[in-house]
Image: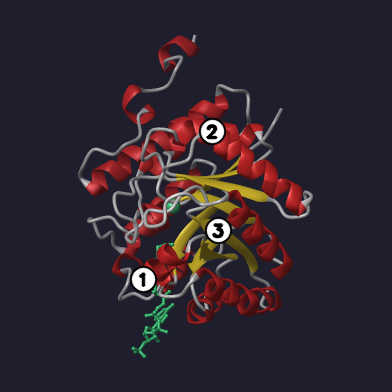
Amino acid sequence: MARVQVVEVSARDGLQNDPAFLTTEQKVELIQRTIAAGIDRAEVASFANPKAVPQMADAEAVLEGLGTIEGFSSIGLVLNTKGFHRAAATNVTEINIVVVSTDTFSQRNQRMDTIDALAVLDEVVPLAKAAGIAPTVTLAASFGCPFEGEVPLERTQMLVERAMNYGVVEIALADTIGVAVPADVKRRFESAAQITGGQVPLRAHFHNTRNTGYANALAAVEAGVSVLDASLAGIGGCPFAPKATGNIATEDLVYALDRSGIETGIDLPKLLEASEWLEGVLDRRTPSLVSKAGLFPPAELTTS
Ligand code: COA
Ligand code: ZN
């Protein structure tokens, strides 16, 4: 049976722009609840400048609160060398360095152009490896930019090649603003896989801004990707991208994968409980749908 690893990003991408400021304890509980449902890898914090992203100001405290959990890999987002040093002082398992594909968005997001963001990789990847922390990269806005529009395939190819040469252990193509469609997903991932020659695993990150997120996720799997990001309840969005909305919802993705015969190791009923809990904490209706519609077949038809 095919297997996909779902990386839970609600505690970072989900909450970084959320009007509800969760307490550190609530963030830790969120992560623990998803781990209890079978998640074995999650973005748990961002070592951004707390003045730029106040929701992530307690990154160190979240990692401290989580402690070390057997079989679970925690990921901290890193945007500059200072952020790396903060991450390295915690017990984080992995760092995910963001490189935005276009200069305008990169400037808005992290006050440096794309080439300067690549220079962060150059500096930080060897430091991370020396510290026993796995360095991964997310190529943000790989499928389109809110300020520059189309992102040429050649730009993605150049960035994948550069990232690979810097020695990252995984490369994610992210649709930060939710404009991708399955044909482009297939085209870009197949092209990326040709460049890496299977040496560096690829990860896919989708937002459902234009309702193509789940089709894109399944297209990525068909293109050979076996690691997908998703956010519990479908919350999320980038503070520096106008109109960007939530990530694909973990429970809706797991439902689609389960019923497609693709194993995730995640317990969907437990995930739905976690989603319901999160909706209570946020005190508003969230975008995910399986959490509202329920399982299929309904539990009463399967327990006889
Ligand atoms: N963590 C904490 N403080 C940081 C920091 C970090 N990662 N990076 C910089 N700072 C501090 C500096 O120490 C300096 O402090 P001082 O004024 O007391 O001396 C101040 O911030 C300015 O430093 P500078 O080097 O000019 O960095 P910056 O403010 O341009 O920060 C980023 C660069 C990338 C860290 C910042 O723009 C950022 O966090 N952006 C958010 C991007 C993001 O999270 N996007 C969504 C997810 S992709
Ligand atoms: Zn995102």
Of mark 1 and mark 3, the one earlier in the sequence is 1
The residue positioned 49% from the left and 13% from the top of the image is 302
Look at the numbered discs 1 and 3 and tell me whether their residues touch, using CB distance below 8 Å.
no
Identify which residue, 178 or 285, lies in the foreground.
Answer: 178
Q: Is mark 1 within 8 Å of ligand 1?
A: no
**82 sits left or right of 121 in the view:** left
The x, y position of residue 59, in whole percent, is 41, 70
Q: Is mark 3 within 8 Å of ligand 1?
A: yes
Q: Secondary structure at mark 1?
A: loop
Q: Is mark 2 within 8 Å of ligand 2?
A: no
Disc 1 to disc 3, how far (Cα)?
22 Å
Q: Amino acid at mark 3?
A: Thr
Of the two numbered discs 2 and 1 in the rendering, the one whose residue sits closer to the viewer? 2
The residue positioned 55% from the left and 58% from the top of the image is 138
The quadrant of the picture occupied by the N terminus is: top right
Q: Residue furthest left?
A: 283
For residue 265, say whether it is visible.
no
Of mark 2 and mark 3, the one earlier in the sequence is 3
- Which residue is identified by label 2? 182
Vertical position of residue 181 compared to residue 69: above or below: above
Identify which residue, 33 or 225, lies in the foreground.
Answer: 225
Q: Which mark is residue 58?
A: 1
Look at the numbered discs 2 and 1 and tell me whether their residues touch, using CB distance below 8 Å.
no
- Which residue is identified by label 3? 138
Q: Amino acid at mark 2?
A: Pro
Of mark 2 and mark 1, the one earlier in the sequence is 1
The residue positioned 70% from the left and 78% from the top of the image is 130
Q: Secondary structure at mark 2?
A: helix
Disc 2 to disc 3, how far (Cα)?
19 Å
